[in-house]
Image (tube, helix red, strand yellow):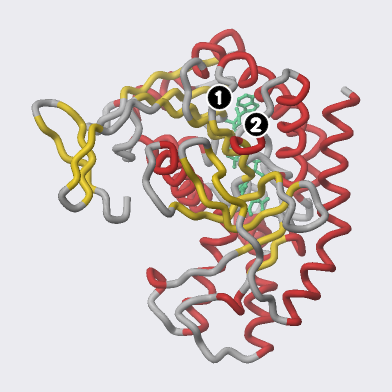
Amino acid sequence: MSGWMMVKSSGRQLLRRGYATVAAPERKVAVLGAAGGIGQPLALLMKLNPLVSKLALYDIANTPGVAADVGHVNTRSEVTGYMGEDQLGQALEGSDVVIIPAGVPRKPGMTRDDLFNINAGIVKGLCTAIAKYCPDALVNMISNPVNSTVPIAAEVFKKAGVYDEKKLFGVTTLDVVRAKTFYAGKANVPVADVNVPVVGGHAGITILPLFSQATPTANLSDEDIKALTKRTQDGGTEVVEAKAGKGSATLSMAYAGAIFADACLKGLNGVPDVVECSFVQSTITELPFFASKVRLGKNGVEEVMGLGALSDFEKEGLEALKPELKASIEKGIKFANQS
Ligand code: NAD
Ligand code: LMR
């Protein structure tokens, strides 16, 4: 919570920034897939977030144990575990933010699109329930393939008559986290100071880090930029291969998911100038969904920000990613409308 501090006064949670002190609003966050590799550490990180007053942990199995465990942490939020479809409605009711890391992860040799057949159905089911029980919630989609699961969610919400493009987000924060880490290493600058926008989508070449806009600036060669770009695009695969069949990124993803959910909560609470990259409905290219910097506010997306000046290398990357991203978006839309 940069610049903001949680303080306690007469048992009340207050937010203080400078001299201004305001009551921290009640906020419910639901995590769907909370007993999984991402779900568990993400549940812990959300339990540590003072902006959360209620934390609902939902999964098809094992949530009572996770909720009992996380619930003993002595922070603000009240934690409840929900297990099985008949408890999904209760988990969702009243949620301000719903985070979805439900679904199967990759094994070595697979692409994110290879997860489509299983995860598309899971996401569709969960979004149908969101439309019914908490249609106003901000939805943070982590389940892969994000380039397709976000369009699926949009179609489900449209069919239910509750779609608000300002409230649906594909979580691409891990790409930003990786780009920052790799850039800091190569440029030899403090990682905490680094900013790098990552645009496009969340798979292979659709992940386009804009190192020409990275700060602090550094005099990196074209070869360095090319290698950093490739490493960011292949970051997920690097983890999948290192885990050798035991799944994909979970801990770094939980960290990234917690950063993005925190940004959503800050936006809802009226904190000014909250900007994160996310895969959202967009008109900044000809594609209907695109990841870019997004300003978050009281209603979700306040502004989808433009791409800024691109290097020739980035311009080429942008054109190269469009056919794959377009196909993934169309695949999601088709699935949602066929099944
Ligand atoms: P995991 O298998 O460890 O956990 C997934 C959890 O989802 C399990 O606990 C499972 O029981 C649960 N689940 C399955 N069907 C469900 C349903 N219908 N309702 C609720 N829960 C359900 O997998 P993981 O490593 O946590 O990864 C989860 C997803 O996140 C995968 O699709 C993975 O590819 C994706 N992921 C995305 C990013 C990103 O940057 N967006 C990063 C890492 C992983
Ligand atoms: C990631 O980027 O780590 C995730 O999308 C998981 C994966 O399959 O690579």
User: In the rendering, at what x and y percent does residue 136 appear?
Assistant: 55, 24
Query: Residue at the location (82% across, 37% down)?
Result: 332
Which structural element holds mark 1? loop
Work out whether residue 261 can be spotted.
yes
| Location of residue 319 with respect to 260 vertically, above or below | below
For the residue pair 12 and 161, the one nearer the viewer reads as 161
Q: Label 1 crowding class (10 Å Cα cut-off): few <14, some 14-19, many 20+?
A: some
Quadrant location, ligand no. 1:
top right
Amino acid type for the residue under numbered disc 2: Asp
Horizontal side of 37 relative to 73 (left or right) equals right
Q: Is residue 237 left or right of residue 115?
A: left
Give the percent coordinates (x, y) of residue 192: 38, 69
Whether tag 1 and tag 2 are in contact, CB under 8 A, the answer is yes
* Residue under the image location 49 percent in, 31 percent down: 97
Which badge, 1 or 2, is on the more N-terminal residue? 1
Residue 34 appearing in the image:
no
> Is 177 on the left-hand or right-hand side of 52?
right
Farthest residue to the left: give it.
10
The percent position of residue 248, horizontal first and vertical second, equals 62, 50
- Residue 208, position as x, y percentages in the image: 69, 66
Picture quarter containing residue 201? bottom right
Q: Could you tell me which secondary element the residue under label 2 belongs to?
A: loop
The residue indicated by pointer 1 is 136
Q: Which residue is mark 2?
A: 164
Answer with the quarter of the image where residue 206 lies: bottom right
State the image quarter where residue 6 is shown.
Answer: top left
